[in-house]
Amino acid sequence: MKAFSERNPLVVAAIGIVAIGGVLAATYYSDELPIIGGGTTYSADFTEAAGLKSGNEVRVAGVKVGAVRSVKLQGTHVLVRFRVKHAWIGDQSTAAIKIKTLLGQKYLAIDPQGSAKLDPGTPIPVARTTAPYDVTQAFEGLSNTVGKIDTTQLATSFETISDTFKNTPASVRAMLDGLGRLSKTIASRDDALQKLVQQTKQVTGTLAGRNDQFAALINDGNLLLDELQQRRDAIVSLLRGTRDLAQQLSGLVSDNQATLRPALEQLDKVTNILQANQDNLDNALRLAAPYYRVVNNALGSGPWIDIYICGLFDSSNAPILDSQAKRDCNTKAGSR
């Protein structure tokens, strides 16, 4: 077998690139793998998509068990493929597209029913699927309908009806007159109403587009509340510990009060004596300073006592003192 260094580097590089690409592909499409995949894929037929998109949640009894894989038109109905994991789907199960948030996000709800497991190749029929009423689409339809109404012709129609029934009883004429005034009011405010409906459509579209941000805001609010709850528990524990410490200190003082009181009384007497003799202590310290300075000079030359005698002998009677010793004695005497 050839050594690794003797092999063709181009072949080794090509094999390495292919291996890395295979690992990346397996990681990206891990849900599609048969052993470690994301579960079993089922399908359901709906009369309309109702805003359901690929990636929306699939829930069973309110618990997320998978995700929608695809939503596509197949003939006269919409085929929704979804994948579930760790959930049992029966052969009589029902599927419904429901509204997850007020902003229009949807999810697929599965109600598992039946005595046998659903065949992944058999979709849930339209008879067992339902779609919600989309408020956003209703506003869009209202906007289109209002935009097509000829408000002037409508007002003329109400006026004609009012003229036709002018010889009817007063109550009917009042009702028709009210309808005429209502039609004129609607006609005069047609632009404002149309603008209001259009702005409502824009608002609903904006809210639907910001759904993820609202969800993130709500999740962050939950995290903040959890953190505040944890800090509250920590503060409660601190207060309890402080209360227990105060109780222990109170017990300690109560238990040792008989011993501490005489000691404090004697300490008070000592402080009173020291206060009364403060002048004497100051005077003693002031007089001790020169003494310790002389002792320091006597012992400062080494491990012996340095002494000298000057003036004991007259210079005429003490020839043994040379001139240098005399000068030293005179110098030291002058320094003293």
Image (spheres, rainbow, N blue to C red):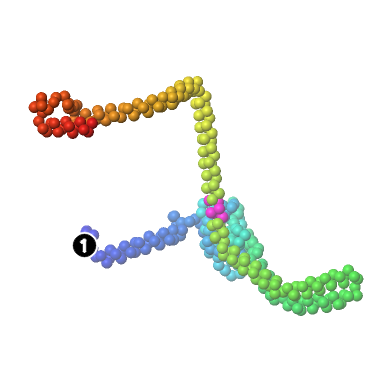
Residue 202 x, y percent position in the rendering: 62, 68
The part of the chain drawn in magenta is: 218-223
Q: On the rendered image, what quadrant is the N terminus found in?
A: bottom left
Q: How would you rate the neighbour count of disc 1 (Cα within 10 Å): few for under 14, some for 14-19, many for 20 or more? A: few
Q: Position of residue 14 (x, y in %)?
A: 30, 65
| Residue at the extreme front | 316
Q: Dividing the image into 4 quarters, which one contains the C terminus? A: top left
Q: Residue furthest left?
A: 319
Residue at the image point whose x is 37% and y is 28% from the top: 282
Residue shown at the point (59%, 61%) measured from the top left: 105
Tell whether 190 sits left or right of 291: right
Nearer-the-camera pick, 155 or 47: 155
Query: x%, y% of residue 238?
Result: 51, 38
Count of marks overlaid on the render = 1
Image quadrant where residue 141 sits: bottom right
- Look at the picture and state if 256 lies above or below 300: above
Please give the residue where the numbered disc 1 appears in the rendered image: 6
Magenta includes 296?
A: no
The answer, for residue 1, to whether it is visible in the render is: yes
The verdict on residue 219 being magenta is: yes
Q: Quadrant of residue 217?
A: bottom right
Label 1: state its secondary structure. Answer: helix
Give the residue drawn at x 31%, y 27%: 288
Where is residue 65? Give x, y as percent.
Answer: 53, 54
Q: Quadrant of residue 156?
A: bottom right
Amino acid type indicated by mark 1:
Glu
Above or below: residue 260 compared with residue 225: above
Q: Nearer the viewer, residue 115 or 168?
A: 168
Report the residue at 10% width, 28% height from top: 321
Front-lying residue, 225 or 297: 297
Q: What secondary structure is the stretch in magenta mostly built from?
A: helix
